[in-house]
Amino acid sequence: MKKRKVCIYDACPYDMPSFANDDRTSVFAHLGARAGYTTLAWIALMKGVVPGQSFFTGLSMLAMSLLFDYLKFSPQTAFRRNIVWLGYVFTLFWLLVGIIGLFQVITIVKAPDGLFITATEDFWGWRDFYFPARNLWAGVGLTLIGMTIIDWVTNISAGEAKSIQMQGKPKGP
């Protein structure tokens, strides 16, 4: 005899329809689109390289959105896990830099030679620390855009995987 599941409350999960999500992803959920909008965000971030803390707000928002995007993926191969892990590390580093700037530990100041990142006047550490803001902006672009492109290129899409299986070749790196 078949065993019946019994619920003792009104909203029995066995009597309710399935809540499985059957949504399809759009073109903007593609890893290539992520590399594209990361590049656009990085270019827009350049406009925020002005004296003060506004650059760090944009940097935090860019890094946070990429971090949440990386958290959505759980790669199945060791090679892809390492790529995504490296993306986590870079993204967390830039998020930390952004948060340090938001807490006004560091700031961007104007000097005769250009814009520099230094410790704020009321912060007791790193008094003589000056780093060119241009180099920081370039570092953000190199690491974040570079990682999104590497992530995109090393990923095997469902269509590619099906084609590889049809040809009888092993799947993935």
Image (spheres, rainbow, N blue to C red):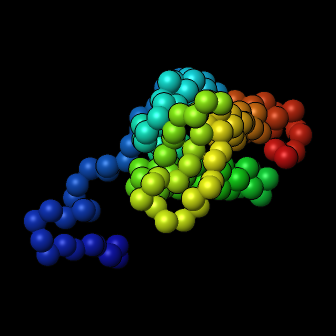
State which quarter of the image contains the N terminus.
Answer: bottom left
In the image, 31 versus 103, the foreground residue is 103
Left or right, 117 with respect to 139, comes to left
Q: Residue at x 12, y 71 (%)?
A: 9
Q: Position of residue 79 (x, y in %)?
A: 79, 53
Task: Spot the residue most to the front.
Answer: 112
Left or right, 28 with respect to 79, comes to left
Q: Residue at x 70, y 53 (%)?
A: 86
Q: How many labels were placed on the picture?
A: 0
In the image, 114 versus 35, the foreground residue is 114
Is residue 37 among the parts visible in the rendering?
A: no
Is residue 24 among the parts visible in the rendering?
A: yes
Q: Position of residue 23 (x, y in %)?
A: 41, 35
Judge whether 50 appears above or below 52 on screen.
above
Q: Residue at x 43, y 42 (%)?
A: 53
In the image, 92 versus 123, the foreground residue is 123
Q: Residue at x 65, y 45 (%)?
A: 131
Q: Position of residue 156 (x, y in %)?
A: 73, 37
Q: Position of residue 92 (x, y in %)?
A: 57, 55
Task: Spot the residue most to the left.
Answer: 10
In the image, 161 versus 85, the foreground residue is 85
Judge whether 2 appears above or below 142 on screen.
below
